[in-house]
Amino acid sequence: MEIGEILSDSLAYTKEAFVGKWVRWLIFIILGLPVALISILYQKEMLMSGAKPSFEHFPWVQFIALLVIGILLSFFASGYMVRIYRGTKPAPDFEYWGDLFLDGFRLLIVTFLWMLPIIVITVVVAAIAAIVFISAMGGSSGGILLIVLLLIAILVAIIAVIIVMLFATMGVIRFARTGSIREGIRFSKIREHIETIGWGKYIIALVVLFVVNFIFMLIVIIPSLIPVVGDVVSLIVSPLIMVFTARYYTLVYDLAGEPQQVTT
């Protein structure tokens, strides 16, 4: 399967997943509603105050409640993505909610484990930046050396982010296929899988996906400039992008061998 075929299949998969499946689409919207309401709540406070809401008067209770509910509901949406990663075709229904929640929670763990190196590097870069700032304020003679060190650290951080994203993308699908968190972060096996696909083909596939999603975002960003309306449009369109991207990743993963299809 070539990249063009992957794009066509992903689009057809997404169309089948939502066209005529209004209940499924509505469930996605409900799952994303708390996060959208957080943005709407913030914009409402800005309109009422004429500026950014003050820390003291911000509706923190509502914000925290929506945040907690949003996080919990996101596990169901993430669990749905796990089912797509497993190769389920056609798109699965929302059922066995307990398994959905558990899969979503485990996917969060896998994602967090992949993010740990980035978090550590970010902390290191921030620490170096703080030292550079303090040194500059104090007029230290070693300021130039520290600036060079900071630039090197930033470059290393960028490279690390790219590497982690390349491996994490296949890692989450490996987790979905094996059902093992450990396998989802097994660097050597994931490297072998990517080598089987071909590094060049794999990177080109991800670049194509980035361009397609960027175009999607440009379409969404125009109405997003309108308060509240943008949040509603994003809430409606986001499920399409999520399912399309999940299917695309799945087919890229299957370039290494025969797809493991699960019919529903």
Image: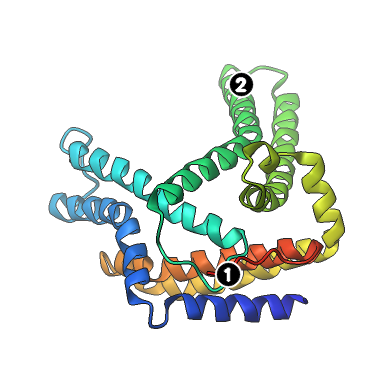
Please name the residue shown 63% across and 49% down the image: 172
Q: CA distance from mark 2 to mark 1?
A: 56 Å
Q: Which residue type does callout 1 highlight?
A: Thr
Which percent across, then down, holds residue 229? 27, 70
Please name the residue shown 24% across and 55% down the image: 43
Above or below, 62 against 38 in this view is: above
| Label annotation for residue 99 | none
In front: label 2 or label 1: 1
Q: Quadrant of residue 201?
A: bottom right
If the image is split into quadrants, where does the N terminus sit?
A: bottom right
Specify few, some or many for label 1: CA neighbours under 10 Å numbering under 14, 14-19, or 20 or more: few
Q: Earlier in the sequence, mark 2 or mark 1?
A: 2
Q: Which residue type does callout 2 highlight?
A: Ile
Specify few, some or many for label 2: CA neighbours under 10 Å numbering under 14, 14-19, or 20 or more: some
Q: Is residue 61 visible?
A: yes
Residue 64 is left or right of residue 197, and the answer is left
Residue 155 is left or right of residue 67, and the answer is right
Instruction: Quickly name the residue at label 2.
Output: 131
Which percent across, then down, holds residue 226? 29, 69
Secondary element under disc 2, as helix, strand or loop, is helix
Q: Is residue 224 visible?
A: no
| Label annotation for residue 263 | 1
Q: Which residue is outermost to the left?
A: 48
Q: Quadrant of residue 107?
A: top right
Please name the residue shown 58% across and 16% down the image: 138
Which percent across, then down, holds residue 205? 73, 67
